[in-house]
């Protein structure tokens, strides 16, 4: 299971053979050790039950015959992404997976399901504690040698400054070859699998009649062998197709060591044009919203591209980083700041996923965590708009910045804290923006009344994932801030309520704090914020403990899982 542990043992037996020829140890080499039986935590059934299996329906009948055929190929490409991500999550998954597959203990079915959901033996909703075996989670996942420390990485760069670009690239893995650290491009590390995925993308490109989809798929299939995703990211921004597809290396959350390496993921979706058109009018408000950010004008980002298309889509299938653990409700891509400055970023809201989670999780959470008077205020429209504006807010505020005369990016300056700060910023600005637009008459003013309770229920939904996840840490920061600023109150029975008269002020002050950290690329101030506000408050922990019977998330079942 742990290949790195075998190395010293092999070395020792070699030494023994040299030093002691003719000993028993040498004459009768042991047969390959039979792997130890897998140790699985006793509560595996309960853990698996936290993820309620639910069908996520999608309609594809309105697509052309060519697009339906393209969809078949995209689903196959997505399955390849699952294999790549499995390796990125942990190098040992390849050895462990077949052992989990043949497990015949009483909890075997649950163990297999949980291993699939977590993409490895560590529990992503229990701060990455192992549920199979006892080995701690390697912070660098499968991107770095497991025994490599930050100090060793930094020492290497100090000694080999020319390696910096390759080592810190989001598109390389770090390996140890003959004792030396080397950077290996994704196109080399995952060559065979990427070739398979590229073949499916080209087949899909040939099948579709949509020129923009054809162009994106062709360029993306090229990127798999060149590691240059710029042209295909630009083409993805121009995609105007009923099929909405993401496939490639994007988010860097999986890399807990430096937050640098991008994990492969795929979302294969069918766009709902009527919803997208209804929402697209909000994009016209982005420059206005940037101008209303609660920070000095000098910190505002006025150079970013203005085009930020919003789409609503239903998932056909997801894969890799997009399918592990807790399911995403929406995404905002690409992450390449060059593309974002040229074209903005595209937000895709996953409506069938959102509806499934609202019914299965958010409403039941509200009934437990909120005072009974506030439960009715938790409604789907407010939730949908909050998620929409969370995503829009990722495109607002500082991106590329200057720190001490250097041109840099917020992401690089805030390092491993970036994701948590950025997610908290997006949540807080999501609420702030909706209030600004309600005030302007763009959004129905009624949302101001129901949003605080809906937002509060959402905080509990996310806080249950623990503070090890960027989103989880982000909401813990928000909750502590709101408690301290008396924007949330806890009743004697432990239920939470928003305090409407303080709510807007607290949201605004936290937005100012987060945006200031980003504008200055102030890592020390980010550390201070996390240090002060990053621990789950006792009242919240007590309420979270009461949410045991509510599913943590859903385990989506797509009809496309059965396509062959
Ligand atoms: Zn986000």
Image (cartoon, rainbow, N blue to C red):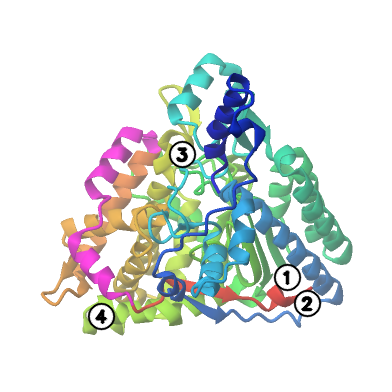
Query: In which quadrant of the rendered view does residue 19 lie?
Result: top right
Tag in front: 3 or 4: 3
Q: Is residue 311 left or right of residue 226?
A: left
Q: Which mark is residue 374?
A: 4
Q: Residue at x 33, y 58 (%)?
A: 475
Question: Which residue is at the far left?
Answer: 492
Q: Which residues are magenta?
A: 519-548
User: Which type of secondary structure does the marked residue at label 2 adopt?
Assistant: loop
Rendering coords of residue 489 (x, y %): 16, 68
Rendering coords of residue 390 (x, y %): 44, 60
Q: Which mark is residue 63?
A: 2
Rendering coords of residue 347 (x, y %): 57, 60
User: Which type of secondary structure does the marked residue at label 1 adopt?
Assistant: loop
Query: In which quadrant of the rendered view does residue 464 lie?
Result: bottom left
Q: Residue at x 82, y 64 (%)?
A: 210
Q: Residue at x 25, y 77 (%)?
A: 370
Mark with earlier residue (3, 4): 3
Mark with earlier residue (3, 2): 2
Relative to 11, does residue 61 appear above or below in the rendering?
below
Q: Give the total of numbered labels.
A: 4
Q: CA distance from mark 1 to mark 2?
A: 7 Å
Q: CA distance from mark 3 to mark 4?
A: 40 Å
Q: CA distance from mark 4 to mark 2?
A: 42 Å
Relative to 93, does residue 49 appear above or below in the rendering?
below
């Amino acid at each position: 299971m742990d290949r790195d542990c075998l190395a010293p043992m092999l070395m020792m037996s070699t030494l023994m053979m040299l030093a002691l020829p003719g000993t028993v140890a040498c004459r009768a080499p042991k047969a390959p050790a039979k792997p130890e039986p897998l140790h699985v935590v006793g509560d595996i059934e309960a853990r698996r039950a936290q993820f309620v299996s639910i069908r996520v329906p999608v309609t594809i009948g309105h697509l052309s015959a060519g697009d339906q055929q393209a969809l078949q190929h995209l689903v196959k490409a997505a399955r390849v992404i699952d294999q790549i991500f499995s390796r990125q999550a942990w190098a040992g998954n390849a050895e462990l997976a077949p052992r989990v597959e043949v497990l015949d203990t009483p909890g075997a079915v649950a163990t297999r399901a949980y291993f699939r959901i977590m993409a490895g033996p560590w529990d992503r909703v229990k701060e990455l504690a192992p549920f199979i075996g006892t080995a701690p989670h390697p912070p660098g996942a499968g991107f770095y040698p497991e025994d490599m420390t930050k100090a060793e990485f930094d020492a290497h760069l100090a000694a080999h400054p020319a390696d910096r670009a390759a080592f810190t690239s989001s598109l390389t893995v770090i390996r140890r070859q003959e004792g030396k650290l080397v950077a290996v491009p994704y196109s080399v590390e995952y060559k065979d699998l990427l070739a398979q995925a590229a073949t499916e993308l080209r087949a899909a490109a040939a099948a579709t009649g949509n020129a923009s989809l054809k162009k994106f798929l062709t360029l993306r299939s090229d990127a798999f062998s060149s590691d240059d995703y710029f042209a295909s990211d630009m083409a993805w921004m121009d995609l105007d197709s009923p099929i909405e597809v993401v496939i490639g290396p994007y988010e860097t959350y999986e890399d807990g060591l430096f937050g640098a390496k991008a994990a492969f993921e795929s979302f294969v979706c069918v766009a709902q044009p009527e919803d997208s058109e209804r929402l697209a009018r909000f994009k016209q408000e982005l420059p206005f919203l940037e101008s209303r950010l609660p920070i000095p004008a000098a910190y505002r980002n006025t150079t970013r591209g203005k085009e930020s298309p919003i789409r609503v889509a239903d998932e056909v299938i997801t894969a890799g980083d997009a399918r592990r653990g807790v399911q995403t409700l929406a995404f905002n891509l690409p992450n390449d700041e060059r593309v974002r400055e040229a074209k903005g970023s595209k937000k895709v809201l996953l409506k069938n996923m959102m509806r499934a989670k609202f019914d299965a999780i958010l409403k039941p959470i509200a009934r437990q965590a909120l005072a009974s008077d506030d439960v009715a205020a938790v409604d789907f429209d407010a939730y949908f708009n909050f998620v929409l504006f969370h995503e829009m807010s990722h495109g607002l505020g500082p991106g590329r910045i200057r720190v001490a005369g250097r041109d840099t990016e917020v992401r690089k300056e805030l390092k491993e804290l970036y994701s948590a700060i950025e997610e908290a910023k997006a949540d807080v600005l999501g609420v702030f923006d909706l209030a600004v637009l309600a005030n302007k008459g763009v959004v129905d003013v009624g949302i101001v009344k129901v949003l605080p309770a809906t937002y509060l229920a959402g905080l509990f939904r996310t806080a249950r994932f623990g503070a090890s996840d960027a989103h989880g840490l982000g909401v813990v920061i928000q909750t502590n801030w709101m408690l301290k600023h008396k924007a949330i109150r806890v009743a004697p029975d432990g239920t939470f309520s928003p305090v409407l008269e303080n709510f807007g002020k607290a949201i605004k002050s936290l937005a100012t704090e987060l945006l200031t950290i980003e504008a200055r690329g102030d890592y020390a101030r980010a550390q201070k914020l996390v240090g002060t506000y990053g621990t789950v408050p006792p009242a919240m922990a007590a309420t979270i403990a009461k949410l045991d019977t509510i599913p943590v998330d859903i385990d989506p079942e797509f009809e496309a899982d059965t396509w062959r």
